[in-house]
Image (cartoon, grey):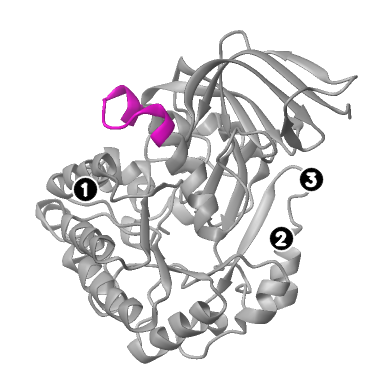
């Protein structure tokens, strides 16, 4: 490996400094003022250069998918087998993808993710955990959640919470509404999300903890987050492209690739989500990357596992928000990189001198058709299969080292 990189003729997209044309130098694993002798020269030929994506809340370490999608860091959810509730498991997960991908494990909020007994966060932080997460489900017991937030606050850790009231959503597979009724599927009201958020925000107000709702997908839930931010509470939230571009109509014909958690919502909620992206209520755009094979998806809808393979399409679908005039390109990069990096306390999201050289080079206008069967990653379970889109990652650079 050479001492550094010299990337010329690029459109630089910095979430803070904005967009400019120019060059960027890398020395070792850092962005530098000048490239060292012997640096590898890369001609960007007018392509865009931006910070690498920090994907907050993936369910599998999928190096190939991340490299293809411009992802240089992932925050790994604790829902492994066994769950990440032990320092040894956390340490092993943090090393799982070296040297090609930074993996930042999220400590399980409770032992075995059962929602009863707190895990030992302090020891897991020493082993590499960057935040605390409730996993795929809610911590239903309010007393336990109070202790989760209090313990996390004492260590200055963000709690990443799943926002659905478990009492309402248990056994449900879709959102209540016309589509659920027509298909005869078990459903839960969308207000289950707002009920969970309201409970957690009340406990945040009590403890002073920082909380990140990994996905907020309803108008009621977003209104609560918006009000909490105005109140000064330490709250952030994220969303996936699926909940911005698809509604519950996408599950028609029992399409299991569109079975997600949380489930797809009504068109009115989808529009509210787009408005929340525009006004800044939503901080993070994440992939919720959860590769599932045919044994999990080629089943009756109610029996299929929720989840989608999203890392390879995250940038392209996010660029749709820019093309539609909802946000500007630097704001998109903040949602993909700067904000998630800040929430879990890692480097990322900057092209300034001295910043980590985790980068992606991409063509925002390159047309392609999403084809799950052609994905580089572990599975093809995308709800956007066969959809035309624009924007392709050309090169992913991690720690100053080009990948792929």
Q: Residue at x 20, y 45 (%)?
A: 270
Going from the N terminus, do you reach mark 3 or mark 1 first? 3
Residue picked out by circle 2 = 94
> Secondary structure beneath disc 1?
helix
Residue 188 vertical position relative to residue 51 in the rendered view, above or below? below
Cβ atoms at labels 3 and 1 below 8 Å apart? no
In the rendered view, does 365 fall on the left or right side of 230? right
In the rendered view, does 187 fall on the left or right side of 80? left
Q: Quadrant of the N terminus?
A: top right
In the rendered view, does 329 fall on the left or right side of 121? left
Magenta stretch, residue numbers: 320-331
Q: Residue at x 35, y 88 (%)?
A: 141
Q: Residue at x 17, y 50 (%)?
A: 269
Coordinates of residue 385 in the picture (x, y in percent): 40, 32
Q: CA distance from mark 2 to mark 3?
A: 11 Å
Q: CA distance from mark 2 to mark 1?
A: 36 Å
User: Between residues 343 and 22, which one lies in front from this camera angle?
Assistant: 22
Going from the N terminus, do you reach mark 2 or mark 1 first? 2
Residue picked out by circle 1 = 248
Count neighbours of disc 1 (C-alpha within 10 A) and say few if under 14, some if 14 to 19, many if 20 or more: many
> Secondary structure beneath disc 2?
helix
Coordinates of residue 310 in the picture (x, y in percent): 47, 42
């Amino acid at each position: 490996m050479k001492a550094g990189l010299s990337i010329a003729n690029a459109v630089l997209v910095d979430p803070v400094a904005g967009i400019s044309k120019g060059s960027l130098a890398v020395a070792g694993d850092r962005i530098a003022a000048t490239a060292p002798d012997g640096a590898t020269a890369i001609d960007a030929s007018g392509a865009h250069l931006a910070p690498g994506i920090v994907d907050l809340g993936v369910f599998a370490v999928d190096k190939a998918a991340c490299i293809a999608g411009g992802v240089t860091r992932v925050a790994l959810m604790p829902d492994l087998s066994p769950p990440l509730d032990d320092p040894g498991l956390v340490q092993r997960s943090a090393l799982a993808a070296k040297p090609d991908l930074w993996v930042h494990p999220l400590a399980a909020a409770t032992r075995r993710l059962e929602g009863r007994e707190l895990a030992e966060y302090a020891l897991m932080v020493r082993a590499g955990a960057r935040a605390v997460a409730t996993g795929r489900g809610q911590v239903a017991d309010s007393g336990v959640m109070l202790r989760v937030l209090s313990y996390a606050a004492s260590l200055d850790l963000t709690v990443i919470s799943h926002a659905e009231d478990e009492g309402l959503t248990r056994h449900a597979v879709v959102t209540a509404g016309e589509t659920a009724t027509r298909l005869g599927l078990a459903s839960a009201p969308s207000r289950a999300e707002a009920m969970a958020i309201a409970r957690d925000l009340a406990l945040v107000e009590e403890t002073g903890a920082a909380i990140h709702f990994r996905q907020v997908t309803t108008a009621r839930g977003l209104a609560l987050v918006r009000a909490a931010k105005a109140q000064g509470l330490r709250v952030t939230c994220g969303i996936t492209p699926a909940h911005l571009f698809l509604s519950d109509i996408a599950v028609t014909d029992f399409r299991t690739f569109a079975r997600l958690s949380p489930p797809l919502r009504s068109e009115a909620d989808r529009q509210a989500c787009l408005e929340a992206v525009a006004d800044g209520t939503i901080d993070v755009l994440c992939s919720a990357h959860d590769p599932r094979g045919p044994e999990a998806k080629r089943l009756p809808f109610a029996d299929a596992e929720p989840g989608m393979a999203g890392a390879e399409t995250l940038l392209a679908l996010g660029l749709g928000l820019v093309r539609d005039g909802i946000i500007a390109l630097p704001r998109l990069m903040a949602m993909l990189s700067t904000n998630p990096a800040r929430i879990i306390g890692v480097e990322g999201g900057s092209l300034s001198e001295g910043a980590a050289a985790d980068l992606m080079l991409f063509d925002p206008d390159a047309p392609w058709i999403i084809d799950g069967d052609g994905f580089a990653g572990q599975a093809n379970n995308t709800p956007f299969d066969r959809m035309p889109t624009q924007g392709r990652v050309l090169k992913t650079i991690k720690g100053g080292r080009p990948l792929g």
